[in-house]
Image (tube, rainbow, N blue to C red):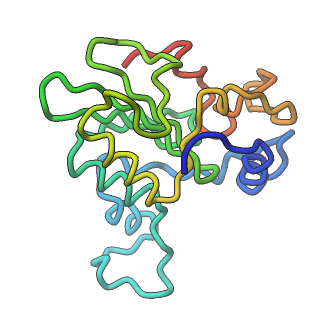
C-alpha cells in the first residue's frame, strides 16, 4: 500500500500500542534484530534455540517487517541505526553497485507503517522531496524490488505530508508538543529532512 493514510487509522494503532496517548507507555517496543537474521532474533527473544523449520502453531508469527528486512538484505547492504528513543526499526540500505544511492527506511513498531526515503548518490542530506511511496521516473534498478517487498509485507508507505501532520492528543516523554505523526510512529527525533545526514 502506498501513500496517504487517514490519521484516525494511525490513532487506532497508536492507542493499541501506547495505551493512553496523554501518558504513553513505551514498553511495547522490543529491541530490534540488528544484524542478525529475523529467525535468530525471534528465537533469542522467545528464549528458544531451535530451527525455524520446526516452528509449530504455538510459536508467534514473525512480524512482516522482519521478513522484509531479510529479503532486502539479499540485494542491499542493511545497516541498523535504530536509536534509543525510537519506536521503529531504522535502516540505511545501500546498493553494492558503485554510484548507487541510499535508501533510508523506518518500519514502525506501532503499526504497519513505514517511511522510505531515497537519497540520490549526488546528495548527502535527506530532503522532503526524497520521500518515496512508489516508483518514480528515473528510479534506480532496485526500486521495483524494494516496493514489492514492502507491499508484500503489508506495510503502508507514508508520504511526507502524512508524517508531518500533528497529533494534538499525544504527549511524548520529552514533553515537546504538538507531536508529529513521525514522533508517534517512528522516533522522538525531528523529521529526517530537518536534521539528518547519513
The percent coordinates of residue 8 (x first, y second) are 80, 47
- Residue 24 vs residue 169, the one in the foreground: 169
* Residue 108 to residue 183: above or below: below
- Above or below, 181 against 112 in this view is above
> Would you say residue 127 is visible in this rendering?
yes
Write the residue at 45% across / 36% down: 82
Residue 39 shown left or right of residue 106 in the figure? left
Point out residue 14 in the picture as x, y percentages from the top left corner: 74, 48
Instruction: Confirm whether residue 108 shows in the render.
Output: no
Q: How many marks?
A: 0
Q: Considering only vertical position in the picture, is 46 above or below 105?
A: below
Q: Residue at x 40, y 47 (%)?
A: 147
> How far across and how far down the image is residue 69, in percent?
36, 51
- The x, y position of residue 134, in whole percent, is 45, 40
Residue nearer the viewer, 137 or 96: 137
Q: Quadrant of residue 135?
A: top left
Image quarter for residue 5? top right
Q: Looking at the figure, which quarter contains the C terminus? A: top left
Q: Residue at x 79, y 24 (%)?
A: 175
Give left or right: position of 187 versus 174. Answer: left
Amino acid at each position: 500500500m502506498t501513500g496517504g493514510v487517514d490519521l484516525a487509522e494511525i490513532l487506532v494503532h497508536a492507542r493499541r500500542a501506547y495505551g493512553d496517548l496523554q501518558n504513553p507507555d513505551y514498553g511495547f517496543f522490543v529491541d530490534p534484530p540488528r544484524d542478525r537474521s529475523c529467525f535468530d532474533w525471534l528465537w533469542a527473544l522467545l528464549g528458544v534455540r531451535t530451527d525455524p523449520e520446526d516452528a509449530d502453531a504455538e510459536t508467534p508469527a514473525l512480524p512482516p517487517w522482519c521478513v522484509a528486512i531479510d529479503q532486502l538484505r539479499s540485494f542491499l547492504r542493511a545497516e541498523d541505526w535504530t536509536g534509543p528513543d525510537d519506536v521503529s526499526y531504522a535502516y540505511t540500505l545501500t546498493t553494492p553497485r558503485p554510484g548507487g544511492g541510499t535508501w533510508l527506511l523506518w518500519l514502525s513498531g506501532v503499526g504497519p507503517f513505514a517511511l522510505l526515503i531515497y537519497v540520490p548518490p549526488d546528495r548527502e542530506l535527506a530532503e522532503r522531496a526524497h520521500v518515496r511511496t512508489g516508483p518514480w521516473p528515473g528510479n534506480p534498478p532496485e526500486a521495483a524490488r524494494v516496493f514489492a517487498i514492502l507491499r508484500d509485507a503489508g506495510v503502508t508507505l507514508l508520504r511526507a505530508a502524512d508524517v508531518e501532520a500533528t497529533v494534538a492528543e499525544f504527549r511524548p516523554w520529552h514533553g515537546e508538543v504538538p507531536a508529529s505523526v513521525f514522533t508517534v510512529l517512528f522516533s522522538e527525533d525531528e523529521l529526517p529532512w530537518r536534521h539528518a545526514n547519513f
